[in-house]
Image (cartoon, rainbow, N blue to C red):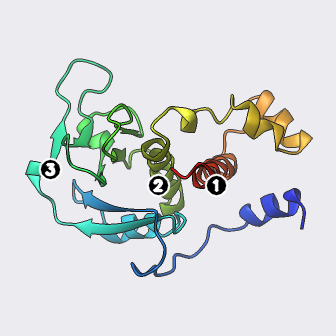
Amino acid sequence: MNFTDIINWFKRTPPVPVNVTYETFHRHVYDVMILDDIDQKYVENALMTIPNLFGFRIIPVNLDEYEIDRSNTEWKNFVYPRKNRDYLIIIFDGAARGFKFGGGACILDEKYHRAGISIAGMTSAWDLGLRIWHELQHCTDKDNTADMLYKNPSFKAMLPTEMQASINNGKADNRYYLLIYNAWLSFNSILKGV
């Protein structure tokens, strides 16, 4: 099997979620709080598309564990776990709250792993899973590498020529490139022992 075969395998229909038990291997286990009456099954299906490097527990809503950004910046209405609350993901409806981004991770906080994820613009549980995985990679690496899909020279160098050309020409804006990039980042994090 060569790299192109692997890419074609990922291009098949998104996987059907399977149950993951918490006795299996996880590098980190995150609590997941779901706000705004978002369907829990939808979120569970999204979480099941993320590799077993991460484990998840759905927890009840607790107003004491999250905050809403009230500033007049572009992060206005972002919902995020309170400082000092480690390994928590908040899932919220960004469109209903007037938040314009897909999510964010609190990467400047070296000791804690926190993220807020908006479901706005998501067309499937698979797409939501990719968004969550992206933010978890920020939490893992504690930097902006997860945002460098089109600019990371090490990633591009390992791709076949036709994929490099797609990225260079801006024609790689699809979930398959994000899936490959997330997997590549996670693999490198494992190698670094993060």
Q: Name the residue furthest left.
A: 64
Q: Is residue 89 above or below residue 157?
A: below
Disc 1 residue crowd, few under 14, some 14–19, many 20+, Cα 10 Å = few
Badge 3 amino acid: Glu
| Residue 71, horizontal then vertical, whole percent | 19, 21
Which residue is more in the foreground, 184 or 90?
184
Question: Which of the two discs, 1 and 3, labels the residue nearer the N terminus?
Answer: 3
Q: Is residue 69 visible?
A: yes
Q: Which residue is mark 2?
A: 128
Tell me the residue at 89%/41% (across/down).
162
Query: Which of the image's four quarters has the N terminus?
Result: bottom right
Q: Is residue 156 above or below residue 40?
A: above
Identity of the residue drawn at 15% across and 60% down:
61
Q: Are marks 1 and 3 in contact (CB under 8 Å)?
A: no
Compared with 53, 151 (above or below) is above
The kind of residue tagged 2 is Leu
Q: Which residue is mark 1?
A: 187
Which residue occupies the foreground of this view, 99 or 7? 7
Q: CA distance from mark 2 to mark 3?
A: 22 Å
Q: Which mark is residue 143?
A: none
Q: Give residue 138's position: percent from left, percent from top.
A: 47, 41
Query: Dot 1 lies on which element?
Result: helix
Give the Cα separation between the discs numbered 1 and 3.
31 Å
The residue closer to the viewer here, 162 or 181, is 181
The single residue placed furthest to the top in the displayed view is 72
User: Element type at marker 2?
Assistant: helix
Question: What label sits on residue 65 in the rendered view?
Answer: 3
Residue at left offset 24%, top offset 58%:
33
The CA distance from mark 1 to mark 2 is 21 Å
Q: Which residue type carries mark 1?
A: Phe
